[in-house]
Image (spheres, rainbow, N blue to C red):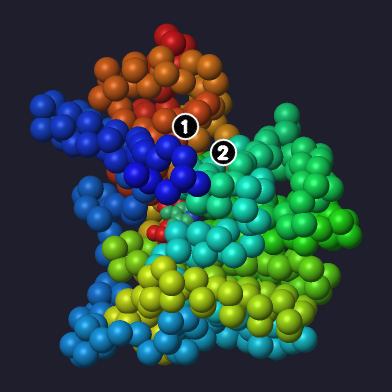
């Protein structure tokens, strides 16, 4: 009975099914004997979900009508949209982006931001360009437009961003499509934890400018985990400089997520932040994307937006939030350091991790066997096409210790 253009549809979410197996194993074998490295949310050293105090204090103070009422606009409350710009680019963003056009649309999470962007810019049946190691819902979102996917390899032999491969794929699509929609998840790439260097970004910039002579370029920059990256404000400025003064037919859409920035996953708040040198492009962005908001989810959580703006527009609360996040950023770093040091000691290959919630071990064709053996040893990870993802955001230091060596011997056995 399904509409004909949908084809066959069935959502197989391996993350949730593996997490379920891990929970069952904990009941059978005892919690201390099971490693559940599947969970993509931040957990503390007691194995509990982290909920940032600053966020909850502000949320609890909100009057009932702020929680229950509809949002004041389909595109987000003005103070929320302002807060997203401040949070992402800093308080001096107007000065920094002088001469540019910037527009924010509030969405249900980063998921809503990415899907709204794909919906409005990927021509029906076209190919989207995605990283080979990726957060897989991007593929589902492209399928909603009957789109197919091409994948840039992400890493070259030196374990740096493979610029040659990226350039070749962008050019190929620019030669055959009017719009080339590209997703880059940076910093804290899910699943690898990679962060592109400024030099790599400068080269990407050149590639996009060159391709823009052939086609419109829509760069969806998934910055979901940006607040868990450890770059300072100066370094962040250098990063955002990359997206300034681009040709008018290059549109950058930063997709932002409160799930990660405030550890409020279930609140479902996020945003699309569009940047362009062209007023017309940004007006068109606003018109088309607000149309999609109205036709898809109408508006998003009023309380979620208010909670964020009450923090960000208050410098003291904002500093308190940053301090709390810094604590957890350091915790994740400690966990990742333990894993990476031990991996080096036992020659376990890990894809180049810099920061973020996850790291990845490439396991190639042995992946199904590795998965089977890991489960036998009560280790549960997210199994990718050619690797396994370890969520350093949720596994305690105690359980991370020794994990690399255990995984190495399992891979050797496979
Ligand atoms: N982008 C990446 C890379 C993610 O891993 C996630 C969530 O796991 C999201 C975007 C979207 O998250 P949400 O919709 O909860 O904001």
Residue 122 left/right relative to 70: right
Residue to which mark 2 is pinned: 133
Left or right, 305 with reference to 94: left
Point out the image quarter for the N terminus.
Answer: top left
x, y percentage for residue 128? 65, 48
Q: Is residue 129 above or below residue 348?
A: below
Task: Answer yes or no: disc 2 within 8 Å of ligand 1.
Answer: no
Is residue 213 visible from the viewing direction of this image? yes
Q: Quadrant of the C terminus?
A: top left
Residue 18 lies in quadrant: top left
- In depth, the one of 134 and 150 nearer the eye is 150
Please name the residue shown 28% across and 59% down the image.
50
Could you say which is closer to the camera, residue 268 or residue 27? 268
Please report the residue visible at 63 percent of the width from the left and 57 percent of the height from the top.
122
Question: Is residue 3 or residue 184 the one in the foreground?
Answer: 3
- Counting every numbered tag in the picture gives 2
Res 184 label: none
Say which label, 1 or 2, has the lower sequence index: 2
Picture residue at 84% right of the left edge, 48% below the top: 175
- SS label for mark 2: loop
Q: CA distance from mark 1 to mark 2?
A: 8 Å
Residue 353 vs 144, above or below: the answer is above
Q: Nearer the viewer, residue 257 or 146?
A: 146
Label 1–label 2 contact, CB within 8 A: yes
Circle 1: element type: loop
Question: Is residue 317 at all visible to an observer of this figure?
Answer: no
Bin the neighbour count of mark 1 within 10 Å (Cα to Cα): few under 14, some 14-19, many 20 and up: many
Drawn side of residue 314 relative to residue 178, left or right: left
Left or right: 412 as drawn, with respect to 145:
left
- Residue 244 place in picture, x, y as percent: 76, 73
Name the residue tied to disc 1: 384
Q: How would you rate the neighbour count of disc 2 (Cα within 10 Å): few for under 14, some for 14-19, many for 20 or more? A: many
């Amino acid at each position: 009975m399904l509409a004909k253009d949908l084809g066959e549809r069935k959502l197989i979410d391996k993350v949730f099914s593996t997490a379920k197996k891990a929970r069952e194993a904990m009941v059978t074998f005892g919690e201390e004997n099971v490693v559940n490295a599947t969970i993509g949310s931040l957990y503390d050293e007691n194995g509990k979900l982290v909920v940032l105090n600053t966020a909850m204090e502000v949320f609890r103070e909100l009057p009932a009508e702020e929680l229950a009422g509809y949002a004041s606009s389909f595109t987000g409350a003005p103070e929320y949209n302002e807060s997203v710009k401040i949070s992402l680019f800093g308080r001096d963003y107007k000065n920094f982006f002088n001469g540019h056009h910037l527009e924010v649309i509030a969405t249900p999470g980063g998921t809503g931001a990415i899907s709204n962007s794909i919906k409005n810019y990927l021509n029906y049946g076209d190919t989207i360009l995605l990283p080979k190691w990726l957060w897989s819902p991007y593929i589902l979102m492209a399928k909603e437009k009957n789109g197919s996917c091409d994948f840039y390899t992400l890493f070259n032999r030196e374990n740096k961003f493979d610029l040659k491969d990226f350039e070749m794929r962008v050019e190929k699509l620019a030669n055959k499509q009017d719009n080339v929609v590209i997703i880059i998840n940076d910093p804290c790439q899910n699943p690898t934890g990679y962060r592109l260097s400024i030099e790599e970004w400068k080269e990407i910039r050149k590639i996009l400018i060159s391709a823009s002579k052939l086609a419109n370029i829509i760069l969806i920059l998934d910055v979901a985990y940006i607040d868990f990256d450890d770059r300072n404000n100066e370094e962040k400025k250098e990063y955002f400089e990359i997206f300034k003064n681009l040709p008018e037919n290059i549109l950058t859409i930063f997709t932002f997520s409160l799930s990660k920035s405030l550890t409020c996953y279930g609140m479902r708040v996020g945003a699309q932040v569009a940047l362009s040198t062209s007023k017309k492009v940004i007006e068109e962005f606003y018109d088309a994307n607000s149309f999609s908001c109205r036709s898809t989810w109408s508006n998003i959580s009023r309380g979620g937006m208010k909670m964020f703006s009450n923090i960000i527009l208050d410098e003291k609360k904002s500093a308190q939030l940053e301090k709390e996040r810094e604590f957890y950023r350091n915790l994740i770093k400690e966990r990742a350091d333990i894993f990476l040091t031990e991996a080096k000691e036992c020659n376990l290959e890990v894809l180049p991790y810099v920061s973020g919630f996850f790291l990845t071990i490439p396991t190639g064709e042995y992946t199904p066997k590795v998965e089977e053996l890991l489960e036998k040893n009560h280790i549960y990870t997210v199994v990718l096409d050619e690797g396994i993802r370890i969520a350093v955001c949720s596994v305690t230091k105690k359980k991370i210790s020794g994990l690399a060596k255990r995984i190495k011997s399992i891979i050797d056995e496979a």
